[in-house]
Amino acid sequence: MLGITPNQATLIGALGGAALGALIGGAVSFIVARYTVKHTANYSGQIEALNQAMSSLATTQEELKQHYAQSLTDEKKRQEENERRAEAAQWKPQARIESNVEGVEQVNKLILKDQADFYLFEVSLLSSDGAKLVDYPMIPEVSTTGFSVPITHASLNQITSNNQQFFNTETFNGAIRYIVKREKDGASYTGEIRFHGQRVYLNNTCFYKLTG
């Protein structure tokens, strides 16, 4: 048996209790820490998930903005195209028949004008009932903002020959038909100008004067 004094026994008991208490306290702290980690909220994971959600939302918003901007661009193009088609469908050059004295002749012309260049494919003389009598020679490869096409005396004879109205009144009726196409967009138009003609004399020479 060890020989210890009462004071030594008291000291040993106190140290042993402290050591045992520390051991038990450490074990309890370890268990509590594990429980806390296992059963409490994972804030780090939640923050990461929130960041990912915000990033995805930002990406979605940017895609929506781009889609909206593209939709506006497409709609503007469609509107411009519709306006272009509507304008092209209504396009036609200014057209009239001029009859003037030039030198010693009464000269009749078809005058066509526009702000944009256009092609003239056909000019035809029609009888009063719409029958084609004469095709005037054209150069379809040429485009310009204006054309002046002579309506010749010889071609008008095609109307007055064997025309009872002309024999009775020295007047007649007919029409000029023309086909044009605008160079910049291919808009085409077929027009017709009806006219009234009469016989006139210059220096004892017979001519025709057209009004239309």
Image (cartoon, helix red, strand yellow):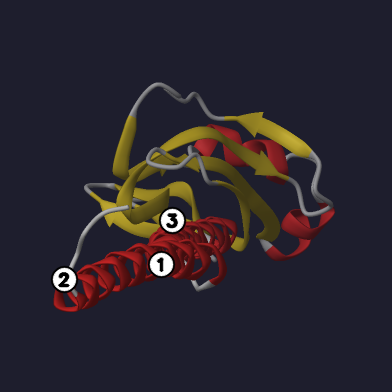
Count of numbered marks: 3
Q: Nearer the viewer, residue 179 or 129?
A: 179
Q: Nearer the viewer, residue 204 or 115?
A: 115
137 vs 12: above or below: above
Q: Which residue is mark 1?
A: 24
Camera sees residue 57: no
Residue 47 location (% of width, % of height): 38, 67
Q: How far separated are the C-alphas under marks 3 and 2?
A: 161 Å
Q: Which residue is mark 2?
A: 8
Residue 187 location (% of width, % of height): 52, 46
The answer to which of marks 3 and 2 sits earlier in the sequence is 2
Left or right: residue 7 versus residue 173 is left
Q: Which residue is mark 3?
A: 201
In the rendered image, the quadrant that contains the C terminus is: bottom right
Name the residue at 72% across, 34% down. Answer: 133
Check residue 68 in the rendering and tell me which mark sits there, or answer none.
Answer: none
Left or right: residue 42 versus residue 184 is right
Residue 113 location (% of width, % of height): 35, 54
Pointers 3 and 1 in contact (CB under 8 A)?
no
- The residue type indicated by label 1 comes to Ile
124 vs 112: above or below: above
The answer to which of marks 3 and 1 sits earlier in the sequence is 1
Left or right: residue 6 versus residue 165 is left
